Image (cartoon, rainbow, N blue to C red):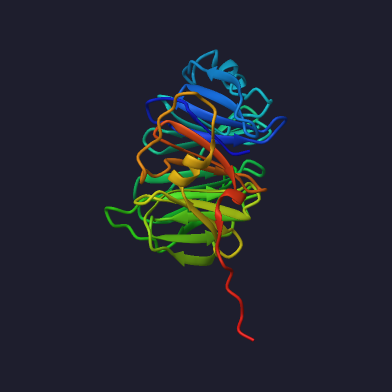
Amino acid sequence: MFWRVHLTNQAVQQIQILPGKPTLLAAWTQRDRATYFDLETGAVVGEHQHKAVSRQSDRWAEFLASLVAPNGVYLPIVRTAQGTFYTTADGKMRLHWLSGDELIVELDGKEVKLELKAKAPLAAIALDRLMGVIAALDGKGKLHLFQQHIAVGAFDLKLSTEEESQFALAIADGGGAIFASDGREIVLVDNGGKVKKRQAVHYPIRRLACSPDGKLLVTNDAETGVIRVYSGDDLTPTHQRHASDLLESAAQLQLIADLPPPNAAPRTLAITDDGRLAFHISGVICAATLKQLDALPRPQPLL
């Protein structure tokens, strides 16, 4: 598993790794159109295009039922003109992030509006696909946590709120590990809002993603395009490599394909529990494993 494909001449909006038989990589070229690849081989498995309808429409339930990948997995994140929709792995709970920062939990067909006491617009949202823990990060660096529709609390993570701050958020299945960043620091938080670890970085983070079990965290360097992997337990860096090097080394699945500029940074990231990762740059999709990255020396205690 180490391949690349030039999917589009325009930016890919998001990518998702969908565990199943087979494990798929979903690449969204538009908010309503996805192409599915076999993560192992890079073979195209199918395409998906949906026509969103109003939440008040009689066809709303039919629309939601269509948001399933070819391997039977509910799509974790779908964007429409109305907002962004997050779905748990069993499809029983959905979170709707609507315009105006309205958050609505839909559970077994019933909707509940979340009482969000944020003093700044929301910057990032993450939904635990196993237990339904919701994490919402606002522009003041405050983390709002919910267990489904029940508020857990709001917690000041002491993140930078400067104009150039780039907020990002990821959550592990079960909600036990939540990763937040302002672009210059990574903060590991548990599902009770307790900060377990802070890790300053020397590069600007644009995106981050964690494995479903929370044991791996992957980030990108917005300036140089370096992909870095950390241990999710203590935020120790473990692997890194330039994304451009990965693209050049990956098996090309087309006869003709253009590579992005050398220092271009990945716009989206995804990683699995066993270290299979995917990213895209300027319409080029790449799938690799930790074996293709350079392992970093682990700190050892002095004897």
Q: Quadrant of the C terminus?
A: bottom right
User: Which residue ends up furthest to the top in the rendered image?
Assistant: 58
Q: Is residue 176 left or right of residue 281?
A: right
Q: Position of residue 237 (x, y in %)?
A: 53, 62
186 or 87: nearer the viewer: 186
Say which residue appears at 66% left-offset and 50% top-offset: 213
Q: Position of residue 87 (x, y in %)?
A: 59, 34
Query: Does residue 214 lie above or below 250 as drawn?
Result: below
User: Which residue ends up furthest to the bottom in the rendered image?
Assistant: 303
Q: Quadrant of the N terminus?
A: top right
151 or 293: nearer the viewer: 293
Q: Position of residue 81 (x, y in %)?
A: 40, 24
Q: Is residue 263 left or right of residue 199?
A: left
User: Which residue ends up furthest to the front in the rendered image?
Assistant: 255
Answer yes or no: is residue 292 visible: yes
Q: Position of residue 59 (x, y in %)?
A: 55, 13
User: Which residue ends up furthest to the left in the rendered image?
Assistant: 163
Question: Residue 297's image quarter?
Answer: bottom right
Query: Does residue 87 lie above or below 140 as drawn?
Result: above
Q: How many marks?
A: 0
Q: Is residue 200 left or right of residue 213?
A: left
Answer yes or no: is residue 96 visible: no
Question: Residue 204's image quarter?
Answer: bottom left
Say which residue appears at 60% left-offset and 84% top-offset: 302
Say which residue appears at 63% left-offset and 48% top-offset: 275
